[in-house]
Image (spheres, coloured by chain):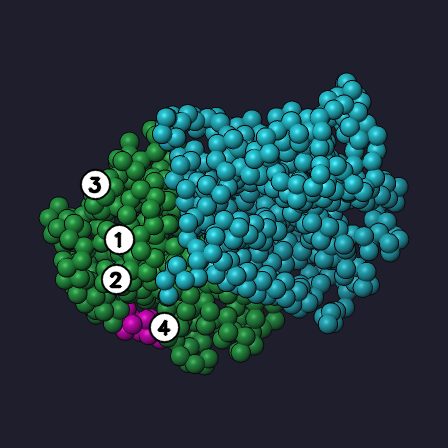
């Protein structure tokens, strides 16, 4: 077989492959970043209060973390390869700048991999407190790694910290300006919060299903309450940060903002359009328009008079196409809609906790909570679509377009299809494996397995029959 | 500065070869361990031995890739353009290997264990073969400079690449068997000590033979590297051969624990020899290290991060290996029924 025979224009396939593999990996990211924190809460409670249920929660979680971290690590490695395999021209030209945040990320990833192994395998032989403290470097490196990767993404949105010579070669690099580019702080904070929000709702949703099925043991309640509380605290903070980030995009990435808010023409008193789409003739159709709201949100100080630049203010070949614009806008609406819903859910939970010291008794609450995990993932993916599709056609904003960056290998469609098949198989197996692991898991400690801490006296129930 | 960054890169390559190489090799022994009953104990030892450390060892690969693309972007672009096929295969192999290894630990039905085990083991051979072939392609000058794609197939299906691939698999198997002997000694499993000692001897001899044949392959196909290996890199080659022979003698005499550092040294010096022989080229003989290097501030960042890594990561890794070697990392929390059925 020669490459010529099966060669197809690679740009679309390279984009699809990158989108698919990143979209897959990003689901595992929140678990890798925030699960250790939730395990820490359970583990702390276990040691401090001699709480056998909490200990069991932490132990089980560390086992599930082992599997998700392994899959997250290898799918992350694929992304490292893909930067070169799919975008060699981009890496060849900008690697000297773009690579800097990843060098830092490598450091954090290393620490995370080392300490997570110590935590996962150290249950029996390590002393309780040293074993507990191992979680701290995991949590720190999870956050540090997130900040580094997002710094690289933010640099693509707001490239800085380098100069090009006349041949277009990167000559002078200011590493700190690359890492701390202007888009980085808010974007990184947004993603760290997202990791805690999505991770919390996702883990809690599994136990919400168990609670709905009448599994009312304390083990399940703890395993629900810990992550759900973390997520509920992250949610309102995320709304504030997200709002600031949107205003940052309004001020600094106006092309993206025009796509987000579906604004064809520059003007003031711009309505906020919920759903709807832009037609090929450049008018907005469908959806619900809230008069003046987009202007008002963009800059509350000037209110309805705030001028929002529309798509007609920018050259057509330097901004997303109409269909890309519609994708960005829909993704934006999804993210905001789900975020609002999760905020209401968090408020409900908070009120119930304030008055009753428990989660809401209505089954409707658990129904929504069990859907919240998937919804939060949809919101996460949508947010990522907004930032990536909203930057089109650029890979490095105003410096390099995606189609100039891609590989010239015409066989990418083959690797794309292969990767889809393998990832789907791995993804489905991962879910099945985790499901089966939790089904075996009875809410009690097998005494021979008690590594440390609680005395068996706290186990005041009859052994349970495993859920089947 | 570019020299220092290249040394950092090579440090990563050596660490990856010496540590992760053994994890891949463990997959090789897993594959050839025989049926479910006969292979149960060696497989349990493999699981036990690499379980806590393979992810940390794997990070060296990411380290190498990131240093390569940040510090030597031009070379990275040329390598990924030309060697698209073996690198894609390696990436897919890494996904399959890591996830199937993790999945295998969670199942205990023989049929399922066999399924995940087969994927884990075959991809443990595929990945080092592909990476070795990539090294061979670079060493033999099949990767053209300048962001152009070399030939898709002949770039990595040629004598030097095949040598690189086969040698990589053999080296991994050799390292793994030597490590597994000392792990078996530590866990007081005399049967497994003998089992892997015999295999380690075979692997050491096989690796030596392949390396010897390799000399002639390189002479015909990778002249620049061959001349380097027979001149300025000759001391490294000699040290490597001596260490290899020392480890073999120690294995034959049954003092397996001491074979381990010699095996590590043998592999590390081979990689050093390759680097010295290829110097000053990144892609012999079209791209020099100094030409491929990124601007100085970027290289300085790599060095700073490397120093930070030396301060933070090396002690952490030492802690991990210390705990592992003192059997403190024995268990993943409470046991699920049947989960450790084999061990």
Q: Earlier in the sequence, mark 4 or mark 2?
A: 2
Is B192 part of what is drawn in magenta?
A: yes
Q: Which is the main secondary structure of the residues drawn in magenta?
A: helix
Q: Chain of mark 2?
A: B
Q: Using the image, tell me which numbered label, if any, was put on residue B158.
A: 2
Left or right? Give the position of B4 relative to B277.
Answer: right
What count of labels does the image hold?
4
Left or right? Give the position of A266 relative to A114.
Answer: right
**Residue at x 59% of width, y 45% of height:** A33
Which element carries disc 2, helix, strand or loop? loop
Q: Earlier in the sequence, mark 3 or mark 1?
A: 1
Q: Which residue is mark 3?
A: B280
Q: Which chain is cyan?
A: A
Percent across and percent down for residue B311 are 39, 37
Q: Is residue B330 above or below residue A307?
A: below
Q: Which residue is mark 1?
A: B142
Look at the image and give the residue range highlighted in magenta: B191-200
Is A106 part of what is drawn in magenta?
A: no
Q: Chain of mark 3?
A: B
Q: Which residue is mark 4?
A: B192
Q: Nearer the viewer, residue A67 or B4?
A: B4
* Distance in Å between CA atoms under marks 3 and 1: 17 Å
Say which of marks 4 and 2 sits in front: 2
Q: Earlier in the sequence, mark 2 or mark 1?
A: 1
């Amino acid at each position: 077989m020669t490459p010529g025979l099966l060669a197809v224009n690679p740009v679309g396939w390279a984009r699809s492959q990158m989108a698919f593999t990143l979209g897959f990996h990003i689901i595992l990211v929140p678990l890798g970043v925030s699960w250790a924190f939730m395990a820490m809460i359970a583990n702390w409670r276990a040691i401090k209060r001699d709480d056998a249920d909490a200990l069991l929660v932490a132990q089980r979680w560390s086992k599930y973390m082992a599997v998700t971290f392994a899959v997250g690590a290898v799918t992350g490695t694929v992304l490292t390869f893909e930067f070169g395999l799919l975008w060699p021209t981009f890496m060849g030209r900008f690697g000297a700048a773009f690579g800097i945040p990843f060098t830092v990320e490598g450091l954090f990833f290393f620490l995370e991999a080392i300490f997570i192994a110590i935590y996962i395998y150290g249950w029996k032989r390590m002393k309780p407190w040293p074993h507990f403290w191992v979680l701290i470097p995991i949590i720190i490196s999870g956050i540090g790694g997130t900040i580094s990767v997002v710094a690289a993404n933010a640099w693509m949105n707001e490239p800085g910290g380098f100069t090009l010579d006349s041949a277009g070669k990167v000559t002078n690099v200011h590493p700190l300006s690359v890492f701390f580019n202007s888009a980085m702080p808010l974007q990184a904070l947004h993603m760290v919060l997202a990791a805690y929000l999505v991770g919390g709702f996702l883990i809690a949703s599994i136990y919400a299903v168990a609670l709905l099925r009448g599994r009312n043991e304390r083990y399940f309640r703890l395993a629900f309450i810990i992550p759900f509380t973390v997520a509920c605290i992250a949610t309102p903070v995320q709304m504030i940060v997200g709002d600031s980030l949107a205003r940052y995009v309004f001020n600094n990435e106006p092309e993206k903002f025009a796509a987000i808010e579906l604004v064809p023409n520059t003007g003031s008193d711009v309505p906020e359009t919920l759903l709807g789409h832009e037609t090929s003739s450049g008018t907005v159709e469908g959806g619900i328009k809230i008069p003046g709201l987009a202007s008002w949100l963009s800059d509350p100080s000037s209110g309805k008079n705030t001028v929002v630049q529309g798509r007609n203010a920018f050259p057509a070949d330097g901004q997303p196409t109409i269909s890309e614009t519609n994708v960005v806008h829909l993704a934006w609406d999804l993210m905001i809609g789900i975020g609002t819903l999760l905020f209401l859910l968090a408020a409900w939970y908070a009120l119930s906790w304030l008055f009753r010291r428990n989660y809401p008794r209505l089954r409707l609450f658990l129904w929504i909570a069990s859907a919240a995990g998937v919804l939060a993932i949809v919101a996460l993916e949508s947010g990522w679509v907004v930032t990536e599709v909203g930057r089109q056609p650029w890979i490095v904003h105003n410096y390099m377009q995606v189609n100039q960056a891609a590989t010239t290998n015409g066989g990418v469609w083959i690797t794309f299809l292969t990767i889809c098949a393998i990832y789907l198989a791995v993804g489905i197996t991962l879910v099945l494996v985790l499901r089966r692991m939790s089904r075996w898991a009875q809410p009690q400690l097998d005494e021979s397995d008690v590594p440390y801490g609680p005395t068996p006296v706290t186990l005041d129930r009859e052994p349970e029959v495993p859920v089947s | 500065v570019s020299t220092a960054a290249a040394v950092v890169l090579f440090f990563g390559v050596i660490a990856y070869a010496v540590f992760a190489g053994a994890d891949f090799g463990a997959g090789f022994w897993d594959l050839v361990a025989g049926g479910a009953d006969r292979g149960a104990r060696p497989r349990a030892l493999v699981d036990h031995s690499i379980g806590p450390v393979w992810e940390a060892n794997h990070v060296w690969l990411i380290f190498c890739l990131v240093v390569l693309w940040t510090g030597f972007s031009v070379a990275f672009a040329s390598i990924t353009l030309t060697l698209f096929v073996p690198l894609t295969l390696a990436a897919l192999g890494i996904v399959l290997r890591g996830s199937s290894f993790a999945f295998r630990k969670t199942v205990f039905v023989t049929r399922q264990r066999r399924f995940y085990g087969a994927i884990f083991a075959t991809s443990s051979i595929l990945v080092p073969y592909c990476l070795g072939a990539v090294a061979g392609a670079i060493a033999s000058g099949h990767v053209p400079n300048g962001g152009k794609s070399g030939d898709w197939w002949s770039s990595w299906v040629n004598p030097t690449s095949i040598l690189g691939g086969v040698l990589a698999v053999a080296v991994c198997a050799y390292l793994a068997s030597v490590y597994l002997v000392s792990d078996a000694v530590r866990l007081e499993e005399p049967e497994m000590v003998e089992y892997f000692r015999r295999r380690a001897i075979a692997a050491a001899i096989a690796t030596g033979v392949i390396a010897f044949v390799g000399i002639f392959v390189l002479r015909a196909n990778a002249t620049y590297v061959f001349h380097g290996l027979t001149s300025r890199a000759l001391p490294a080659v000699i040290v490597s051969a001596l260490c290899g022979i020392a480890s073999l003698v120690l294995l034959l005499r049954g003092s397996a624990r001491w074979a381990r550092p010699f095996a590590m040294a043998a592999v590390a010096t081979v990689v050093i020899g390759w680097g010295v022989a290829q110097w000053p080229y990144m892609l012999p003989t079209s791209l020099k290290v100094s030409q491929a290097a990124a601007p100085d501030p970027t290289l300085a960042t790599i060095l700073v991060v490397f120093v930070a890594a030396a301060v933070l990561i090396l002690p952490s890794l030492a802690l991990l290996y210390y705990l592992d070697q003192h059997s403190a990392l024995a268990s993943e929390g409470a046991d699920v029924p049947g989960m450790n059925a084999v061990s």
